[in-house]
Image (cartoon, grey):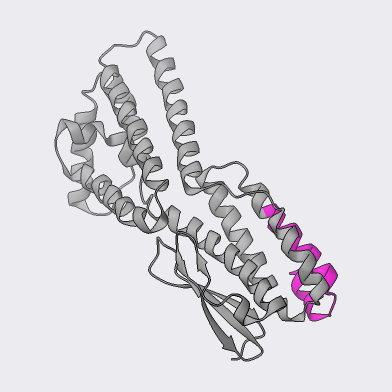
């Protein structure tokens, strides 16, 4: 907000300093590569990038020349695979500690199911049929032994490993695989089989995972569009014509009233991401 006011007052050096501080805040937030931290960092970075981009036209050449290396010097952002790998390790290690602590108490070796059922207890869905199915599933879980719970945890680790492997693919290749994985997780509760019940921890910890890569891909594309926008502002539109963002696609340039816009479709989304640069028309 202060940068917006400073840009409006013509205090561009101060405004750029504030924007850079917010961009550093965003990267620091994501330095712990948990999925939540990465998503929060991406939202913070979007706010700062949008403010800077729409005011690029008011910066002097010397300011643009200082800005590009300052942005390049920011800490690197963790990847989608980094976030999933970190969350998988933390979640599975936490569950292992809890499980082994319960076993160490000398509990009944066949009492693991109660532990698993408590972990996966859910509030009413509002759908009587769904609630009845959930209750039946929890009843089946109560028959599990500690060995069964360990197997469920092993499958959770394996599912996290599968997600990491998908995340390490190029963005354009992983989208369909993430969607297929999520569909498989959605089908788990509907199946009344032992194999499906053993996937209960995966059903609990891995919902809607396919939405995460798209948000991080958007942040990556926006970041690179900003760099191209600064180059276009400094050297002209011809300097970036034909540009492509690796792993995503070509960059489109369109002049607007008092500025221009750059767009590129992130590989894991349907909608092009548009960065407004300079003053745009109504």
Is there any visible trace of residue 2 in the rendered image? Answer: no
The answer to which quarter of the image holds residue 148 is: top left
Q: Is residue 120 left or right of residue 272?
A: left
Q: Is residue 42 above or below residue 6?
A: above
Image quadrant holding the C terminus, namely bottom right
Overall secondary structure of the magenta stretch? Answer: helix
The residue lying at 63 percent from left, 49 percent from top is 76
Q: Is residue 149 above or below residue 214?
A: above
Residue positioned 76% across, 80% down in the render: 58
Q: In the rendered structure, does residue 15 fall within the stretch colored magenta?
A: yes
The image position of residue 275, as x and y in percent, is 57, 74
Residue 264 image offset from top left, x and y in percent: 48, 71
| Residue drawn at (50%, 37%) of the image | 86
Q: Looking at the picture, does residue 66 appear above or below residue 158?
A: below
Q: Which residues are magenta?
A: 1-25
Q: Observer-nearest residue: 92 or 162?
A: 162
Q: Kindly tell me whether residue 36 is visible in this rendering.
A: yes
Left or right of 142 in this view: 118: right
Residue at the outermost top position: 106
Along the horizontal axis of the image, is 76 left or right of 120?
Answer: right
Residue 77 magenta-highlighted: no
The residue positioned 50% from the left and 46% from the top of the image is 35
**Quadrant of the rendering where the N terminus is positioned:** bottom right
């Amino acid at each position: 907000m202060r940068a917006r006011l400073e840009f409006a007052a013509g205090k561009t050096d101060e405004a750029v300093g504030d924007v850079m501080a917010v961009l550093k805040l965003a990267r620091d937030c994501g330095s712990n590569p948990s999925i939540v931290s990465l998503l929060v960092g991406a939202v913070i970075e979007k706010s700062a990038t949008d403010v800077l981009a729409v005011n690029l036209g008011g910066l002097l050449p010397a300011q643009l020349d200082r800005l590009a290396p300052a942005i390049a010097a920011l800490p690197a952002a963790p990847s989608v695979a980094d976030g999933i790998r970190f969350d998988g390790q933390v979640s599975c290690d936490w569950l292992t500690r809890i499980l082994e602590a319960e076993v160490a108490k000398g509990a009944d070796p066949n009492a693991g199911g109660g532990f698993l059922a408590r972990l996966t207890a859910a509030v009413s869905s509002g759908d009587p049929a769904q609630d009845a199915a959930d209750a039946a599933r929890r009843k089946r879980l109560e028959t599990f032994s500690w060995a069964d719970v360990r197997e469920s945890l092993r499958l959770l680790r394996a599912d996290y490993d599968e997600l990491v492997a998908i995340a390490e693919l190029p963005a354009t290749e992983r989208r369909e695989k993430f969607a297929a994985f999520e569909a498989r997780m959605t089908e788990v509760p509907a199946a009344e089989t032992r194999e499906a019940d053993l996937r209960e921890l995966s059903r609990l910890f891995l919902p809607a995972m396919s939405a995460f890569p798209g948000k991080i891909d958007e942040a990556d594309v926006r970041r690179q569009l900003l760099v191209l926008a600064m180059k276009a502002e400094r050297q002209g539109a011809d300097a970036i014509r034909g540009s492509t963002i690796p792993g995503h696609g070509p960059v489109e340039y369109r002049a607007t009233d008092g500025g221009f816009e750059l767009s590129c479709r992130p590989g894991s989304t349907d909608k092009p991401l548009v960065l407004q640069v300079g003053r745009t028309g109504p």
